[in-house]
Amino acid sequence: MALVGSPNVGKSAIFNYLTSRYVTVSNYPGTTVDVSRGELKIEGKKYEVIDTPGIYALIPLTDEERVTRQLIFCEQPDLVVHVADAKNIRRMLLLTLQLLDAGLPVILNLNMIDESQKLGIRINTRRLSDVLGIPVNTSSAVKKYGLDTLKKEIVLYQAKEPVRLLFSDDIEQAITLISSLLQNNYNTTDRMAALLLLQGDEVILNSVSSEPDFPKIIAVKRQLAARYNDNLDYILTVQRQVMVDNIIGLVMNYTETNKSRSAEKIGRLTREPITGIPILILVLYFGLYMFVGQFGAGYLVDYIDENIFKKVISPLVQAFIYQHTSVEWLQSLIVGEYGIFSLGFRYAAVIILPIVGTFFLAFAILEDCGYLPRLALLVDRLFKNFGLNGRAVIPLTLGLGCGTMAVMVTRTLESRRERILATFLLSLTIPCSAQLGLVLAIISGNSISVAIWAMFVGLVFIIVGWLAARLMPGGPSAFYMEIPPLRMPIWSNIIIKAYTRMSWYFIEILPVFIITSVLLWIGDQSGILSSIIAATEPAMTLLGLPKEAAQAFLLGFFRRDYGAAGLYDMCTAGLLNDAQLLVAAITLTLFVPCVAQLVVMVKERGIFVSMIMILLIIGIAFSAGMGIHWMLTLLGGIWGY
Amino acid sequence: MEYGAIRGDILSDKLLVTALRPGDKAKVFALNVLNKQHLHKLAVFGILPGTEVEVLQVKPVYVLRIGHTDLALDQEIAQSITFIR
């Protein structure tokens, strides 16, 4: 059984309810970029439930939409639950009709029925069910209403011939003719294959070209297209909308109500530039700088490290180890300088986790209230300069939390070019929250340093983004995005979401940190580490850094934040002066992404593109570091560096 | 229903989005059918001939209200719609 529907209608919320599993739910289109599977048991019967990325129509525009169509066609689910936003039923039914043309067994579930009722929309579901010939259910997934009746509909579902809505006679004749000529297997009905062919779908067109009757088929299409000035796709869509409008006329009535004007007003203030940009700055200042930077990276990390870890946990573990083993190498493997516990576990759990946790909490609030699409709209013009459109703001902002997650989310971008540009900018210029927190902790003693760091990294973002967009052929795709209503976030949802992301992050990073500390421990014991450090020493000299900083950069290859954590320790030990800290902070911010992000990059963008990016990143990071080092040396006297 | 009207032959009572101000209401007259991608994007949001649209905002991008959906569009895609008052 598959849950299918437009973006941001609540498929994932319903999935979570049906399967008691958790997948991320939020208030912006495109939260789900991959397929999730779970199990639903009703009255002893087991159903496999599949949550799919949102699709607007069966002809896909982005990668994640392609995933969904592929799934519907190839896996042929026994039941498709079309989840729709009740208040936007007019455009939702377009997809219902397409699913029916594809011969799929469909239940229509009108979700967010509470919102539509508040707006004064009344839908006669029984009549709608009669008109379409399929079961229709209404629900409000977040309010846990109407989902038991959905379960009942699923159990009771019996396939019957749905009512077929017809296009104009000439089109229907062409469909029948083409259907009768098709011999290949298209994993869908011949009618749907014919319709997709008429609409100019490329995948279908490719496979049709191997048909023995291909010339005849194309002749039918040409003949019909000629009658409509070659705008078949448009004509089919318009005719489908006419069918929908006829249905709407039968089943829906609308009485204007006094809707809540305050949410509407705040919604307007956040998207108009005069008020929106100051609000954006406030959101960044309080959400990112104050909450994540000051509270998470400053207060929480200090408190946990000083009062809990160093006072309670660390002495306990050390005592335990010294008590139970006198083997020296084992002691140092666990609690030594590069020990699994004292380095790997401490960095992951004590230094990184509080920062990432506070970021995910702040991000979840922004997601659920529906702020992110407004942010996308505000920055669209700016992003066009970097070959991207406003849509890219979502992966790039998420990158301030975790770059690995963000690279996966670049799937929501339309063209391959945009996905490559966004991945590159993410890997080069966007520091993840752990790194950001640590970098700020290192340089926050000097507010001029913070300002120079921010300006310099911002400048690199602008210059590299601008250049990359000019050097890569093509242009940004047009920006279009649905702006969902601002909603009061539901706190339980936010906490579950932040917690799920935190545990995903922790499970992913803890092994990397532990393996890294073991590798470093081996390197340290065998003396390899010091020779590697010695080998990278000249690079450090070019940057004007002490040779010990080489270690931080090596760590940085395993995880960028890990490298910053190494600098953090050098900083507390007082080994670096302000200028050196600034150079190191800038270079590390730009330096190669962590191993986890690299793996995802290779998976999403391919090994060739990823390697080119890595080489560019190393080059740019070091030249930028050298540049700022020289600049500071030249201007040294002026700012007291 | 009229399907025609491609950019360039805009008559006096037909408008492009650039002629509309926040608060204006207009009906969609036709879409520029030359760009299939744009056409698909607009169609799935119900922007088709005869649809009533309210303009909420024009800068930095256009925000149009279609039924109960607010949709942000940049100039490029918004200009492929022809309106009639």
Image (cartoon, helix red, strand yellow):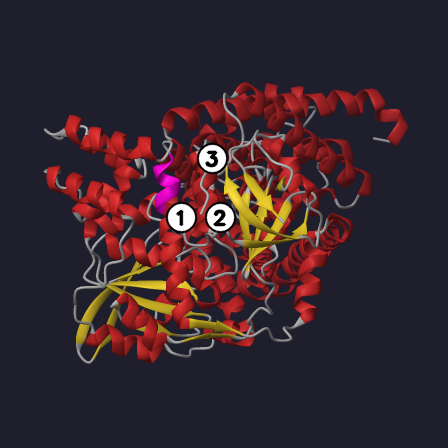
Amino acid found under the numbered disc labelled 3: Arg
Camera-side residue of A106 and B39: B39
Cα gap from disc 1 to disc 2, whole angstroms: 8 Å
Amino acid found under the numbered disc labelled 2: Pro
On screen, residue A154 versus residue A545, left or right, reads: left
Bounds of the magenta segment: A231-236
Q: Which mark is residue A238?
A: 1
Residue at 47 percent across and 31 percent down: it is A420
Label 2 residue SS: loop
Q: Chain of mark 3?
A: A
For residue B80, which quarter of the picture?
top right
For residue A270, which quarter of the picture?
bottom right
Q: Residue furthest right?
A: A638
Residue indicated by mark 2: B49
For residue A546, which quarter of the picture?
top right
In contact (CB < 8 Å): disc 1 and disc 3: no
Nearer to us: label 1 or label 3:
1
Residue indicated by mark 3: A419
